[in-house]
Image: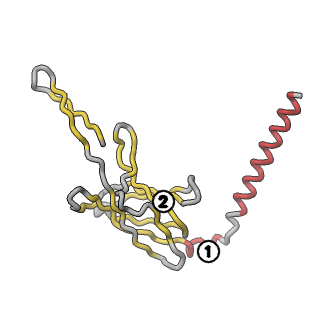
Amino acid sequence: MKKILIIAMFVICITSDVYSQVSSSDDCKEDPTSIPNQLIQLKGKVEIADKNNNKSVRVGAYIVFQKAECKKCLVATYSNSEGDYSILLGQGKYKVFIFEGPLNGQFYNALAPEQEHYVQTKAGERVQNFNIKIKLREPSVILDESLDGISTQTHKNYQ
């Protein structure tokens, strides 16, 4: 009985694996020569917004675009020394992430609350502009002074 159950589970696993490969390959039956016509250049500037509405550019921002209907479909770029970025994306809707950190060992998404979190690339538009505002978390510094009052250790906590 155990052998029959094991064989049945094996057949189910093989069948589902083959089916997933066939169904995913059906999505990719486009003519490869049409791919360049489907690419859109998305470009813009990454700006840091502070409490006083002062703006400065973010150099080296790590920008990730995730295809809206595909959690594993990721593409990324960095902003240059002027805060500008440029990336080629396929047509569709993308969720935008700006990863900063690590803070306490973890990265965080630094998109400003008022920043649009999705961008829609449109067919027929070869170049689209999409500026990104970010808000960096501010450290609060705690000084831990030794008994002699000379040496200090700085510890940063982030809000």
Residue flagged by tag 1: what amino acid is it? Ser
Question: Of residues 15 and 118, which is closer to you in this image?
Answer: 118
User: What is the number of the mark on residue 95?
Assistant: 2
Q: Tag 1 or tag 2, which sits nearer the N-term?
A: 1
Residue 155 spot, x, y in % from top left: 24, 33
Residue at 36%, 42% in the rendered image = 102
Say whether residue 109 is left or right of residue 18: left
Residue 4, located in which quarter of the rendered image?
top right
Give the residue at the far left of this rendering. Answer: 149
Residue at 36%, 63% in the rendered image = 132
> Rounded to the nearest whole Å, what is the CA distance between mark 2 and mark 1?
24 Å
Indicate the secondary structure of the residue bearing disc 2: strand
Image height of 2 relative to 110, above or below: above
Image height of 11 relative to 19, above or below: above
The residue to which callout 1 is attached is 34
Crowding near the residue tagged with mark 1, few <14, some 14–19, many ≥20 C-alpha atoms within 10 Å = few
Residue flagged by tag 2: what amino acid is it? Lys
Crowding near the residue tagged with mark 2, few <14, some 14–19, many ≥20 C-alpha atoms within 10 Å = some
Residue 5 spot, x, y in % from top left: 85, 33
Residue at 42%, 58% in the rendered image = 77
Residue 10 spot, x, y in % from top left: 81, 38
User: The C terminus lies in which quarter of the figure?
Assistant: top left
Say whether residue 77 is left or right of residue 80: right
